[in-house]
Amino acid sequence: MKTEELVSVLHLVFILNLVDEATGLRVKMPSLPIQAEDDAVHGKGTAGCSFGDRLYALRDTWHPDLGQPFGIMHCVVCYCEPQLNRRGKVNGKVNCRNIKHDCPELQCRVPVLLPGHCCRTCPQDNASSFRKKPEEMFDGFEYFPLEKEDNLQKSPNDRSYISSEDISMDDSRTDFVALLTGTSGRSPASKGVAKARLTLVRSNLIFAIHYERLSRPIRVSFRDRDGIVLFEHPVHKTSSPQSNLICGMWRNVHKPYIKFLKSDQLHVALMTQPQPDVSIQGKIVKHRALFAETFSSVLTSPNPECSGLGGIAMLTLSDVENNLHFIIMFEGLLRRSKKDHSIVPVRVQLLYRNQALREVRGNITTQDSDFAEVLTDLSNKEMFLLSRGQLEIALETEDRNPNRISGFITGKKTCDTIQSVLSGGNALTPTKTGAVGSAKFTLHDNGTLEFQVQVAGTASEVIGLTIETKPRRKNKRNILHDQTSDYRNGFAIGVSDRLNARDIHMLLQNELFINIATKEYEDGELRGQINSLLYSGLQARYHELPIPLAGQFVVPPIKTGSAGHAWVSLDEHCHLHYEIVVAGLSKAEDITINAHLHGFAEIGEMDDNSGEHKRLLKGFYGSEAQGILKDISTDLLRHLNRGTAFIQVSTKLNPKGEIRGPVLIQNQCESKGFVTPKEPDYEESLFQEIKPDPEELKKDPNSCFFEGQQRAHGSQWAPDYDRKCSICSCQKRTIICDPIICAPLNCSEIVHVDDKCCPVCKDKVETKDEKKTEVEHVEGCYFDGDKKWHPAGTTWHPFVPPFGYVKCAVCTCKGATGEVHCEKVQCPHLPCSQPVRKNVSDCCKECPVTEVAPFDHTDMMQADGPRPCKFGRHTYTNNNKWHPEVPPFGEMKCITCWCDEGSTKCQREKCPVLTCQNIVKQQHKCCPECEDLTSYYDEDGEKLKGRKKGKSSWNAKPSLD
């Protein structure tokens, strides 16, 4: 590949900046890591490349779009090249090359250039190649073809959680598992063991990681088989329901990474320190036992000094008999060798208080990684101990060097929410009373089941609340547990310790139901299936009861068999997060709504009947709708604070509301939009700068030499001339230094700290001891733009190489989730007609201050004359026209620029709409033409003979030569 054919992103950005400044045109610019409201969200922490207004996965290829008037560069191919840094994290680097020189030599006399193509083709080949995409030539690139992403056009409300399309009951989902143990290359190796259970739903990967013998991790890292970091998830205490459980989601996983996942080429790792050292890691695999698993165990060695040794057990019960099926995955138990396939005897024991109750023996080879067996006919005592989490399973080798791992068996650990919506439409004898029931359950390791049930709008008094199985005969109920004694005044809140192992198995297999009986409907007015709601990241699930949605709450009340419940919360930015589950909307009488689109949800004010103040949330697919609502009006925020707001679900049968529920969220949101936290502190980095080998840097042609040191491409540092208030970066042999731009403070008194460039609020100044304590228990966010770890709650202007600090954006670290939330700065409305930007780095324009310039006698003769225009390195007089030059593509003959009294204007040549059948584009012309030989030119510019024209409705789009 020739050096002059390589075009870096920096070069293209410089060209676009040059054109934009000189012409005033709105050329597409490479975007910041800040998405517009209607853009799809790039998965947080995902490695890739940003080019123009799109994000690309590693190894993606594309033709760059420079925007109007230049358009798509069909003769240029860009490639997102993965580069591994010293911390083991991959950075995407964009390389672009001109492929025009790679076009094949043609045998025909008069080749033609088709629209959207780079290379010319022979006319006889046009019929077949006309409908084909341009042929990509990548010369050594490992190529994944560009594919249309399903989530590119999602609405702003679909951005924070899995959309309802992603988790509808009809969608396929794939489960994976990973056993994480200490790595041998780490010194000292970790003694921790963990089980990662992962679920891929569309392009979102949900994970729950249960770990033992490990301090609280701070990051979850996903890597390919070469150790390149593809995604990292910060761990926070508030994001998990249990202390030794990590819940998270990798949103919008790129398709190449999904291929890695499905082909067992992806690894997951846990880090307990800010440094890049991995504590424990393991390969992610699909496993046959995940579908039926209802009990699980993490197995560790009884020797606390033994590292790299561990296992996980996945267990389930037979459908009818008390047989316990299990499979144990293990690591470090055997000394593996490629040539050694010897047989090793093993023993599995089921223990209670170190006493063996059951034992089974078998043989495995040194190449095996799991062992499966069945323990038949468990006794009632064994089933009881299994339900209480008091049984221990142990795997032991019986060779010369025996090893043993063991762990207690509990119900499988996930981050999902066990819940149920009770509706009349799902009753054994369907009812339409407009009532609702809502239930939430929590299963503990000791087998106790915590339940919270709400009932509203029933036609008569509630006389029964029972947990049941599916009827054995039609309408013949099978009651497992009667919880009627816990019901009072519309609520049943309590803990049941009566579940046996079979009940827990059925609960986790979604085979149990909850039934509400009333005086008028003794067999049940409301009924709902108890099932697990996939983890979505919404913290309100763990801390709050859902809001019941019923037809009785609609104005006027609706007699319907539908019902629902919703979790709703406001974050620190006053954005509304919601998750709605409905039931009873898919019965035969509601089929007229749609086969998939069951309805839509709104939020509004209780005293509003006109619908003027309602806000559409989103449509339902399946039975769920999730999302985030921004730009909430001040009036709606006040109604949320007073409890006079509502969430309503409407359908075709009831377009003015089918079910509704009141919403009360006490808040202090004084205005809509972004609320700046009070503590801007974005200079601290918990990651130590890793200095690469200077000798290796000298071999890198893209490295920089500055202040006597060699710097790596993409690196950032504080320069010696101003270590406090400046930051420099190396971008392909070019040094770019910028002064640190401080974010505005929202406090009455500020102070200047010695070791910081920007002032801070006086009441937030901390001592050094407090700082050290905070670092040990850090919660924060890693921002890839400035390569820094920002403490939770801090705000900063993003640093985006090669642009530097961007004052038009303010980023905030959300401590609860570890997400970086960036907002565009809202500029005020100005009364003047021609506002100006005082400084280049300023975001908002201001009204100019009228100043009387001193009279300059040297300009007296030219004061009334038209001003010239400066474009690039050239100056043009008024009314002068030219074709702009854009390296390395040369003169753009299809674009004409002219000077209009000091203002440069450019326009692409307008092409007519063609209606012929075969359309071609000549090399020396800007517009495509009909395939008529009178339109063909030979190399000397002479016309050739004519041909008949055809008709077609296809409109040609001009392409850049």
Image: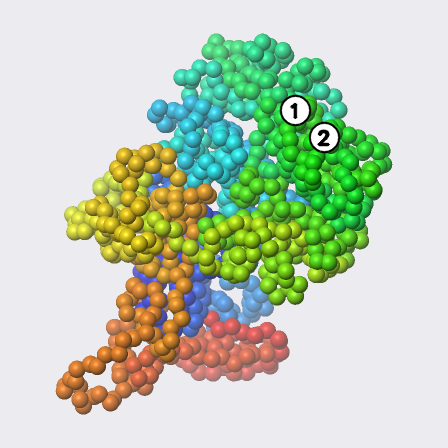
On screen, residue 139 versus residue 166, left or right, reads left
- The residues bearing labels 1 and 2 have C-alpha atoms spaced at a distance of 15 Å
Occupied quadrant, residue 236: top left
Q: Where is residue 290 in the image (x, y as percent from the top left)?
A: 61, 32
Identify the residue position indicated by label 2 in the image: 485
Amino acid carrying mark 2 in the image: Ser
Choose between 628 and 901: the one closer to the eye: 628
Give the image's coloring scheme.
rainbow
* Tags 1 and 2 touching, CB below 8 Å: no
> The N terminus appears in which quarter of the rendering?
bottom left
Q: Is residue 63 visible?
A: yes
Choose between 874 and 136: the one closer to the eye: 874
Please give the name of the residue rendered at 71% of the width and 61% of the height, measured from the top-left corner.
655
Please give the name of the residue rendered at 17% of the width and 82% of the height, measured from the top-left corner.
854
409 lies above or below 467: above
Please give the name of the residue rendered at 72% of the width and 30% of the height, measured from the top-left corner.
485
